[in-house]
Image (cartoon, coloured by chain):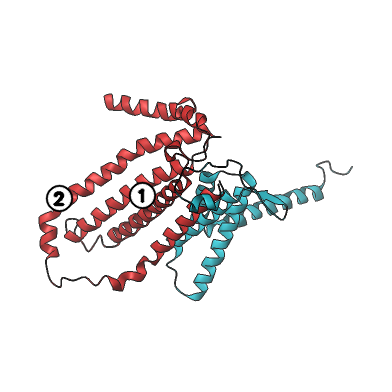
Chain colours: A red, B cyan
Amino acid sequence: MTALGFIASLSARASDAANSLSAAMVSNTQTPAPPSFNNDPQLFMWNLFLMTAGFFLGAMMVGRQGSRIWGQRRYDHPLDPVSLYRLITLLAGMALMIRCGAEAVSLWGWNPDDPALTARALMAKRMVDPIALAFGFTWMALVILGEPGIEHQLRKAPLPVDMWSRWPVLGRALIVIALSFAAALVAVIFR
Amino acid sequence: MRFAAVAGAAAATPIATAPVTWDFLGYSYHPGPVLISIIAVAITRAIVFLQTKGRRQVVLDVLVSMLCALIAALWTQAHSLDLLQAGVTGIGVAAIGLGIISMAKGQVGAALREGFQAMLKVLAGTNNPPA
């Protein structure tokens, strides 16, 4: 019952964004960036850039590992080391996507002319962050639980991994990073 | 806030709050949200659709991406969206992708059918039979 009450109070607070403390703070702060940036456009741009890029890269990771897990589901047992490895990276990507996505929404949505929307984004970030943390704790727990088996398998020859042959696969991530930087620059210049 | 303010030292710079307005063929728009919507389209298309093989497929992808960018930019301009809404619009339009064409086909087809029905009704005249 207490959990239900907690969720009910959360949703009540979320639905009343226009009269929230966050909205009052936003309407009292007539700056183009959140006040924690202290009117520093450079810092704001870096945060916008990295949070946007983090969201998209996390989403790419989740999509990639998800499709790998789904595609190999008949071949790999769920408790195989490779399955654990895929699950760990999937959860890490999910944590990054959720955390950076919520932050990016609150940064992109900062708009003193619309305090209700801005307050909704700010409060949504506070509610979504614990979920991202849960994903993070889960992958760390999986690392600990799977450590003996995974390390035993990883010690088998051939040991050195030829990473540089895979370099072109990162091209898409680089494109996303460059475009995120362009987006943040545009947002800061033309605000 | 200009480029100099961005590229300059990290000192606290006073930020100009007057929004920039550009003009294109008589349509005035805020360049920030419009450019953001286009970049959002580009990022989403790069993530989802950059694995196509073959020349024709790549050409088709580029054309659809340009169509998506155009639609997102026009939508942003027409509704004078803010940054967040412009970005979400760009992501959504790019995610629809090719479906935009079928949606447009459906809309145009429905309009044509309704017009045809109206024309038939006018041609048929009133219900009163000639005496």
Tell me what residue is drawn at x 58 percent, y 60 percent: B67
Closest to the observer, B69 or A80? B69
Pointer 1: residues within 10 angstroms few (<14), some, or many (20+)?
many
How many C-alpha atoms fall within 10 Å of the one at disc 2: few (<14), some, or many (≥20)? few
Taking the image as shown, residue A45 lies to the left or right of residue B126, namely: left
Is A155 in front, or is B99? A155
Give the CA distance from mark 1 to mark 2.
23 Å
Quadrant of the rendering where the N terminus of chain A is positioned = top left
Q: Secondary structure at mark 1?
A: helix
Q: Earlier in the sequence, mark 1 or mark 2?
A: 1
In the depicted structure, whether residue A143 falls above or below residue B60:
above
Residue at the right extreme, as displayed: B131
Please tell me which residue is depicted at 27% across the width and 24% down the height of the picture: A2
Which of the pair A62/B3 is nearer the observer? B3
Tell me if residue B62 comes above or below residue A96 in the rendering.
Answer: below
Residue plotted at (70% across, 51% down): B27
**Amino acid type at image mark 1:** Met
Residue that mark 2 sits on: A144
Have a look at marks 1 and 2 and say if they share a chain: yes
Left or right: where B72 falls relative to A84: right
Badge 1: chain ID: A
Residue B119: where, in percent of width, then height?
77, 51
What mark, if any, has residue B4 been given in the picture? none
Residue A23 shows in the view: yes
Q: Nearer the viewer, residue B57 or A21?
A: A21
Q: Which mark is residue A97?
A: 1
- Quarter-of-image position of residue A151: bottom left
Q: Disc 2: which chain? A: A
Q: Is residue B96 visible?
A: no
Q: Residue A95 location in percent, x, y?
A: 31, 47
Number of labels in the image equals 2
Report the amino acid beneath label 2. Ile
